[in-house]
Amino acid sequence: MDKLIIEGGIPLHGIVTIHGAKNSVLPLMAASLLAPGVHQLSNVPCLRDVVTMQKLLTHLGVESKLEAATLTLNSNSLAANDAPYELVKTMRASVLVLGPMLTRWGKARVSLPGGCAIGARPIDLHLGALKQMGAAIDIKEGYVEATAEKLHGANITFDVVTVTGTENILMAATLAEGTTVLKNAAREPEVLDLADYLIKMGARIEGAGTDTITIHGVESLSAGQHTAIGDRIEAGTFLIAGAITGGSVTVENCPSQFLESLIEKLREAGCKVEATENRVTLNASQKLNGVNITTTPFPGFVTDLQAQFMALMTLANGTSVVSETIFENRFQHALELKRLGADITLEGRTAIIKGVKKLSGAPMMATDLRASASLILAGLAAEGTTTIERAYHIDRGYEKIEEKLLKLGAKIQRKNG
Ligand code: EPZ
């Protein structure tokens, strides 16, 4: 398995062009199941998760081709309606084919996603909402077996804000009979991006981006073209890279409005941050202040940047408290950061970080996508050499990360085997 080797202690300087948002592209790809024809998605990054979704869609009969960040998907001849365990177990977002398949053909068989490093991550809210829309749902041998003559509109309120739950129901409702009102819906930019594409395909949707979305079902949809939004998590990760190495980094091609909660916290930590519509420049401060964060649904501090921000706080003056309210086990990176000399105490969903003067390079193991980003950031700041095993985790959500970091002056290389 490949590993990353980093010589730390070098301030990063330069401009990074941000790729398309992984968490936007995956639902956009699933939406191709809703309408026959050739769909064209632009600003699509070459990521492991995109390849996994391509494999799943190929299994379902949707051939696709990614060339120069444009993904063409041909959904004229659908072949199956089951999402096999072999694919779903590697990527939970596979559940996003459930809603589209059910509303298009009236039946779907999707493997339950199973466990995940950051938490149980059940899909009970997805299934409960589909039942309210008239689906019969059985769980057999680890698979969800869903059937529905024709889904009908319903008034649904999610107990918990769920991003892919919102996206699944949004897609299912576009072809349902009548109107669906979804309350306590996710407001993430990626949900709004999906709604924008569905509307281009002919869907009738109001309120996307707010906590109440109304969808009026239509007879059919048609394939369209869409450009995915920039990846706010990649952008935030590179801004934190500038902050933790004492450098200055500019990220472009990501709307700064998606990064407001992070920018606020980076400024509170003492960094100088300037933002225009699609560019954000961070100049690190020599003295980092400890800052408390609590992860919440958008527009609060995004859980997918919690691990990266924690790495930054390990070198801040004073104590910081990180509260993770979205997932029950998203502190695996803390155990690895302590190997570099970080002072972190875990108490349930709270981490108390006492800043230290320096981190010292050491071997570490990546456990999940955003944890691996956190370890890279710490390695960039640590004195000496850091190695990160199981680097494939990072490739799920970051395209060519070491190339981008090399361009910023980092000393990083990937070793296979
Ligand atoms: C999406 O996951 C993202 N993935 C995650 O990004 C992100 O961390 C998460 O939203 C939260 O923002 C994609 O968009 C592909 P949730 P999702 O349903 O939809 C509970 C990354 O690193 N819940 O919003 O699976 C759940 O357990 C990934 O790019 C239920 O209880 O997350 C969690 O505690 C990691 N029942 C909370 O809701 C359900 O039916 C939020 O989960 C669904 C969710």
Image (spheres, rainbow, N blue to C red):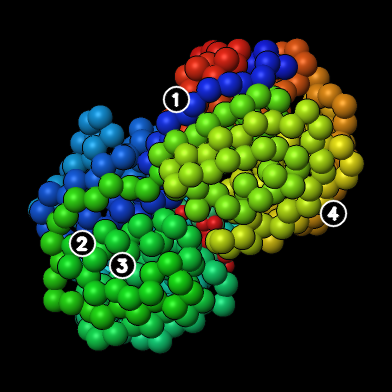
Tell me the quarter of the picture where residue 196 sits: bottom left
Q: Residues within 10 Å of mark 4 (few under 14, many from 20)?
A: few
Residue underneath mark 1: 400
In the image, taking residue 208 as reference, residue 55 lies left or right, namely left
Q: Position of residue 241 (x, y in %)?
A: 63, 30
Residue underneath mark 3: 171
Q: Disc 1 to disc 3, how far (Cα)? A: 31 Å
Secondary element type, mark 1: loop
Q: Amino acid at mark 3?
A: Met
Sooner in the amino-acid sequence: mark 3 or mark 2: 3
Sooner in the amino-acid sequence: mark 1 or mark 4: 4
Q: Does residue 206 sit above or below 79 in this rendering?
A: below
Q: Disc 4 to disc 2, how far (Cα)? A: 47 Å
Sooner in the amino-acid sequence: mark 1 or mark 2: 2
Residue underneath mark 2: 200
Sooner in the amino-acid sequence: mark 4 or mark 3: 3
Q: Residues within 10 Å of mark 1 (few under 14, many from 20)?
A: few
Q: Amino acid at mark 2?
A: Lys
- Of 113 and 7, which appears nearest the observer? 7
Q: Position of residue 319 (x, y in %)?
A: 88, 45
For the point 19% across and 46% down, the residue is 40
Q: Position of residue 281 (x, y in %)?
A: 56, 35
**Closer to us: mark 1 or mark 2?**
2
Residue underneath mark 4: 347
Q: Are marks 1 and 3 in contact (CB under 8 Å)?
A: no
**Closer to us: mark 3 or mark 2?**
2
In the image, taking residue 30 as reference, residue 368 lies left or right, namely right
Q: Are marks 4 and 3 in contact (CB under 8 Å)?
A: no
Secondary element type, mark 3: helix
Q: Residues within 10 Å of mark 3 (few under 14, many from 20)?
A: many
Sooner in the amino-acid sequence: mark 4 or mark 2: 2
